[in-house]
Every structure is written in C-alpha cells, then in structure tokens.
Image (cartoon, coloured by chain):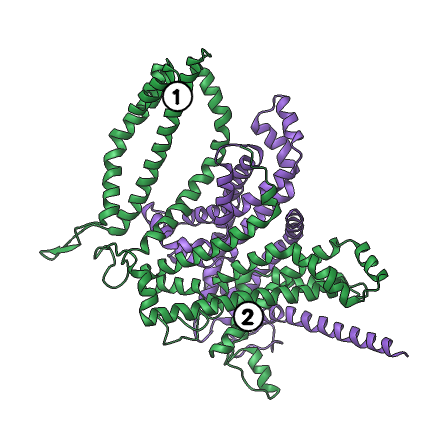
Chain colours: A purple, B green
C-alpha cells in the first residue's frame, strides 16, 4: 500500500468517527429526556438513562396533578388564532407592498426591515401598560395580538419577496379582463404563493409553543397558562423534584412540534436559499 | 399661479373644506368641514390636556385624607395618553395638509379650465388610490400600538426617574430628569461597571456563538456533501434534530443535563475519574456552557443553509480548478469558502444580531447566574437583554432599563440597516413611486 492511500484511509476513519460522535451528541439529550420520562422516580438525581422499570405514570400525573390538558388547549388556541390573524395581516401588507406603487412605500419597507430586528419584549413595559389600559392583560386575546403584531414585519418582507417573483403580467392580464383586486388575489396570487403562505402560517403556529417571555408577561392567572410557562415552572426550582414530570411534558410538546418543524424546514431552506440568491 | 388655486388653498388653510366648497365640490367640502369641527369639539380639549399631562407628568401625588387614599395623578398613564394624543394630532395634521393640497390642485385645474371632479369621480379616484392604504391600515394600526407607541414610551422613560422605591406610580409621581440617567450610567461606579462588564460579555457571547455555529455548520456541510461520504441523508437527518426540537425545551433539558450536582454529565465525568465540573456554578464554566449549548442548538441551521449553497456551486468551477492543478485545500479556500461566505454573509450578520439579544437561551439556561455581587442586579452570564429584563420585571428600575434599551436599539439598528442596505435585493428594489 502506498503512503497516500494509508493517509486517505486514516483521514476517512477520523471523519466517520467525528460524524458518529456528533450524531451521538445530537441524539443523546433527546434520548435522555425520553428515557427520563419513563423513569419511576421523580427527581433528577434518581434518573437513569436505562430506567429500572418503564412507567407511564408521569404522563398520567401531568393531567391529574397539573393542568397539562388545560395548558395544551390554551396553547393550541393561542397558536391557532395567532396563525390566522398573522396570516391575514401579513398577506394584506405584503400584497400592498408588492403590487402597488404609492407614496410612503420606501419608508414602509425600510421601517419593516429595521423593526423585524427587534425582539418583541424590548418594548415590554409599554406593551404591558397598554394591555392593562385596554383591559387585555391576562387574556389570551392580548397575547394573540402581541404575537400577530410581532409577526408582521418579518413575515411581510418574506411574502412580499415571493409576490415580487410572480410575473407582473399575470395580475395585470387579470386586471385588464376586469378582475377585482380580491379576485386577482384569490385566483392568481394565492395559488402561486402557496408554499410561502404555508410557511408563514406554520411558523406563526409554532411560535407560541416556544415563547416563554411574552406569555409570562401577559398571562398572570393559573388557568390561562401556556405550556412553556407550565414546563418552566416544573424545573426552575432548586431541587428539581418534578423533573420526570417535566420530561414527560417535554416529550408531549416536542414530538408534534418537531414533526411540524421537520416538515417546515424544507420550505425554510428553500425560501432562504432563494432569498440568498437574490442578495 | 392662478386666482382659483390661491384662493382655494388659502380658504382650506383657514378651515378644512372651505377651499373645496369654493371649488364647488360641495359634498367633499362638507365632509372635511364636519371632520374638522368634530375634531375640534370632541377631541381637541382632551388632546391638549393629554399633551399638557405629558409635559408635567402630573402634579398631585397620592395622599391620605382621614385614613382614606385619595388618588393623585398617575404619571405613567399620563405619558401613554400624551403619546397617543400626539399621534392623533399628527394624523389630523396630515389630513389637513392633504386637504390644502387637494383644494390647491383642484383650483389650479379650474385656472387651466380643466374639468372639476364630481363627487362620484372623487370617490372612484379615492377607492382606486386608497385601496392600497386600506390594505395597509390593519398592519399600520398594529405597528403603531405595539411598536411605535411602546418605542416612543421607552425612549421617554429614559429621561425620567421612573423607578422603585421612590418614583413608582400610583403612590408617587414621576418627573423628567433630562440626561441624568445617561450620565449616571457612566458615572455611578456600580452601574458603569455593570454596564461595561455586561456589554463586554454580550459582545463576546454574540461573536463566539455566531462564529462557532457558523464554523461547525460549515465543516459538517462540507463533510456531508463530500463525494465519498456514504449515508448522506442519514447524517443530515440526525444532525438536523437539535434544530427541530423546540428551543425552550432543549434549553431546559440542557439546564438539567449540566446540573452540577445531579446532572448526568457530571455523573459520567465522576465515574470515569475526571470529577465534577462546575458547569453552571462558576463564571468561566457558565459562560462556556452557554456557548456549548448554543453550538448544539445552532449548528444545524448553518449546516442546512450551507448545504444548499454548496450544492448550488457550479461543478465546472472545481473541474477547471483541478485542471489548473489546484489541490483539495486550495479548492476549498479559493472556491468553496468565498462562495459560502458571500451567500451567507447577511444571515451571519442577522445571526449576530439575534444572538446579541438571545434572551431565551441565557434566561432559561443560567438565569444570568452565577451572581456577581459587584454588579448592579446582574450575574456573570447576563447579557444586556437579560439584565434589562431583571431591571424591569424584578427590580422596577425602569429608568435605567430604558437607557440600556436605547443603547441596544441604536446598536441593532445600525447593524441591521447596514446589513440590508448592502443586500442587492434592497438595492434592486424598484422604488419608483
């Protein structure tokens, strides 16, 4: 065997070792939390990777001792209405910015670009006070409004880019045929921009499952809690005595969201790649 | 300039709608006149008192009379109302200006003996040109109330003494203090030290967390896309998992895995004889843990993104290079890296801005701890945004929080504006009115 051949084999060996190690690191925390949820004990201390015996008791406890079902329904409700509201707002805005030329357009685009860089809660004191004044504090509606409002700049920019890519001759031809703006939108633009609209809808649906801070700010009473708040409270204490219950809850949230996300990331990479190719 | 345009313009400056009436656009003129009358009667006194409140921030503090509490002025509510009143006034002024311009334009048409639009014509005109504004109204209202008003409010708070324990409504009043808070931030030693220390760590954190995820993502994208690696799809699906699991759950899982006393990582380290590492308890290790956890969470994003870029690089570039005699390393540094950097530069800058404000990771993982007793309500891993959170929600130091958020605001605006100005998609955007 020649020297270079040996070297190539050694390099490839190390590459595969690296891949395997990274794969283990990627999977281990996920596997660990799943196994933890089947552990009979309650505390982090007594948890082992391979449980002494498998039990589903923590999944039952979530519903009996905690209001897990209620949190799930709350989050689902907030996520659903955030998705609808954000989608409507984003479509209106993106359609206007993409298909019309009007005074103030450039300024609106610039404002959106800058605003989308800010995390929602930089303005949280004022949002808190405004919601309080409007009687929306500690209501799901208040939280939905905050989420949907936050989705406008980024989402509109994305969808506007997609609308821009649709040949202008299509809506113009429809207009000459006497189609109204509403018809042009539903019959021409909507079918052609289905992937990006799905993406915006799903990402707004997922966001409320992930958010802790705004939910914590707006929602106060126990019966309004979302999953993120409930799960955080289980492990924020010093002793972690509800750790296995947290693990069960984490699995029940992570499984559907992860599946949605894997479905979603194809759009995301495609969209970002298209966006990047335009830069 | 003709007679009609001047007169119509002057009349509509005098009172909204008069110019239109002069131009014999009766219905339009009446509507505008009624609008102004309504504003003056219904809203103007209230607007003025709100703006006065914004200037004074109230003068009657809460007091006790015969054991009963008599409510005084609530400075903060007065401030919010003042901002809203100014916005309403501004909208009214815009309407006024439109009204004057309209009267002037129609008058000019009359001077030039052109036809004056009937009410129906104007209405059709309005629905054609106004449709786009109608579409934008909902988003505009949301942005106004959830972004513009809060930002204005935040900026104003920085110039007041709104804070616990002595200036917290409704018990006591809040006053304007000018630039005092900004001066204090740099002159009061404990504050200045905290700000400098946290700002330094925030920058280090933002840089390292972006750099590590980018670099590791690049390495794995290159490895997986290399010709001779088998099971490409398998590796990619596994590596994408940390990105797919909801972030706050992974962070909470990590918080437990790195738990110093009971966490599995320290259990393994102890069992193989290395001994427990104070992952979250000591400043240096806590900061390292933050970066490690972020690496785990973040590298799949860059890997996925760069895989897309890599497959997009034309094959013939590499073929040409190998004909020229370039080896694998040269090909990587001369072709792959520049192409990837060029395509992902905006994403990297965005990533930096995102990590700069990555509150979720810091707060859920370490909560800013371990505590630093030389800092003003902050710990060793606190970034500016999590310090802001503590100042606001835990310590009620709203005035200092507002000062810090203005600094973050300016910094992030510069980064993101710079980023988007140089992207071609913005430059090529046809801005024709």
Q: Chain of mark 1?
A: B
The numbered dot on residue B119 is none
| Label 2: which secondary element | helix
Residue B337 or A237: which is nearer the viewer?
Answer: B337
Location of the N terminus of chain A by quadrant is bottom right
Which residue lies under the disc numbered 2?
A: B291
- Rendering coords of residue B67 (x, y %): 11, 57
- Name the residue at 45% across, 53% down: A120
Q: Residue furthest right?
A: A1
What is the quadrant of residue B34 in the picture? top left
Nearer-the-camera pick, A232 or A21 = A21
Q: Which residue is mark 1?
A: B104
The x, y position of residue B168, in whole percent, is 25, 58
Q: Is residue A4 above or below residue B426?
A: below
Q: Nearer the viewer, residue B192 or B397?
A: B192
Q: Is residue B259 left or right of residue B242?
A: left
- How dense is the environment of label 1, judged by Cα within 10 Å: few (below 14), some, or many (20 and up)? many
- Element class at badge 1: helix
Where is residue A49? Give x, y as percent: 61, 76
């Amino acid at each position: 065997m020649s020297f270079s051949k040996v070297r190539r084999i050694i390099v490839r060996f190390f590459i595969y070792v690296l891949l395997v190690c990274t794969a283990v690191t990627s999977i281990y925390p996920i596997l660990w939390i799943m196994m933890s949820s089947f552990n009979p004990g309650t505390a982090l201390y007594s948890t082992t990777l391979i449980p002494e015996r498998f039990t589903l008791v923590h999944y039952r406890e979530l519903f009996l001792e905690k209001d897990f079902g209620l949190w799930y329904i709350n989050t689902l409700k907030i996520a659903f209405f955030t998705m609808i509201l954000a989608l409507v707002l984003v479509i209106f805005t993106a359609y206007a910015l993409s298909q019309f030329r009007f005074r103030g357009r450039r300024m609106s685009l610039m404002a959106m670009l800058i605003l989308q860089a800010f995390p929602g809660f930089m303005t949280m004191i004022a949002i808190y006070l405004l919601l309080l004044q409007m009687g929306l504090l500690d209501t799901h509606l208040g939280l939905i409004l905050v989420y949907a409002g936050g989705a406008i700049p980024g989402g509109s920019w994305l969808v506007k880019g997609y609308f821009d890519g649709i040949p202008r001759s299509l809506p113009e031809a429809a207009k000459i045929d006497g189609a109204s703006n509403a018809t042009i939108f539903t019959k021409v633009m909507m079918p052609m921009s289905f992937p990006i609209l799905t993406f915006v809808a799903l990402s707004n649906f997922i966001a409320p499952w992930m958010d802790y801070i705004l939910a914590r700010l707006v929602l106060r009473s126990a019966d309004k809690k979302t999953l993120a708040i409930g799960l955080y409270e289980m492990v924020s204490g010093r002793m972690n005595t509800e750790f296995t219950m947290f693990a069960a809850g984490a699995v029940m949230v992570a499984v559907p969201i992860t599946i949605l996300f894997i479905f979603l990331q194809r759009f995301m990479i495609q969209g970002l790649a298209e966006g990047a190719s335009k830069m | 300039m003709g007679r009609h345009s001047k007169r119509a313009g002057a009349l509509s400056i005098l009172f909204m709608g008069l110019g239109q009436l002069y131009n014999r656009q009766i219905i339009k003129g009446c509507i505008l006149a009624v609008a102004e009358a309504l504003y003056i009667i219904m809203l103007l006194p209230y607007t003025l008192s709100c703006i006065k409140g914004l200037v004074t921030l109230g003068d009657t503090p809460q007091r006790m009379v015969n054991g009963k509490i008599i409510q005084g002025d609530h400075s903060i509510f007065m401030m919010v109302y003042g901002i809203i009143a100014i916005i309403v006034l501004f909208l009214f002024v815009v309407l006024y200006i439109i009204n004057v311009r309209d009267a002037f334009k129609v008058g000019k048409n009359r001077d030039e003996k052109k036809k004056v639009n009937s009410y129906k014509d104007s209405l059709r005109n309005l629905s054609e040109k106004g449709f786009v504004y109608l579409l934008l109204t909902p988003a505009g209202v949301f942005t106004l109330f959830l972004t513009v008003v809060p930002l204005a409010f935040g900026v104003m708070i920085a110039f007041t003494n709104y804070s616990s324990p002595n200036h917290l409504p409704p018990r006591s009043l809040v006053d304007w203090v000018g630039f005092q808070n900004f001066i204090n931030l740099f002159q009061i030693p404990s504050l200045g030290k905290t700000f400098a220390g946290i700002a330094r760590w925030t920058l280090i954190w933002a840089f390292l967390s972006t750099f590590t995820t980018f670099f590791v993502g690049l390495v794995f994208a290159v490895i997986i896309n290399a010709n001779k690696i088998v099971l490409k799809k398998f590796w990619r699906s596994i590596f994408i998992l940390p990105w797919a699991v909801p972030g706050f759950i992974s962070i909470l899982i990590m918080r437990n895995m790195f738990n110093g006393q009971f966490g599995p990582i320290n259990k393994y380290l102890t069992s193989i004889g290395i001994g427990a590492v104070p992952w979250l308890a000591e400043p240096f290790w806590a900061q390292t843990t933050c970066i490690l956890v972020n690496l785990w969470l973040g590298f799949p994003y860059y890997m996925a993104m760069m895989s897309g870029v890599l497959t997009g690089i034309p094959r013939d570039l590499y073929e040409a290079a190998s004909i020229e005699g370039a080896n694998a390393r040269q090909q990587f540094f001369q072709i792959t890296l520049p192409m990837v950097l060029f395509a992902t530069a905006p994403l990297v800058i965005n990533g930096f801005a995102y990590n700069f404000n990555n509150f979720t990771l810091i707060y859920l993982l370490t909560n800013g701890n371990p505590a630093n007793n030389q800092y003003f309500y902050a710990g060793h891993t606190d970034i500016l945004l999590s310090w802001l959170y503590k100042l606001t929600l835990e310590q009620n130091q709203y005035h200092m929080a507002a000062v810090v958020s203005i600094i973050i605001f300016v910094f992030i605006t510069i980064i993101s504006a710079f980023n988007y100005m140089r992207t071609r998609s913005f430059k090529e955007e046809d801005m024709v009115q």
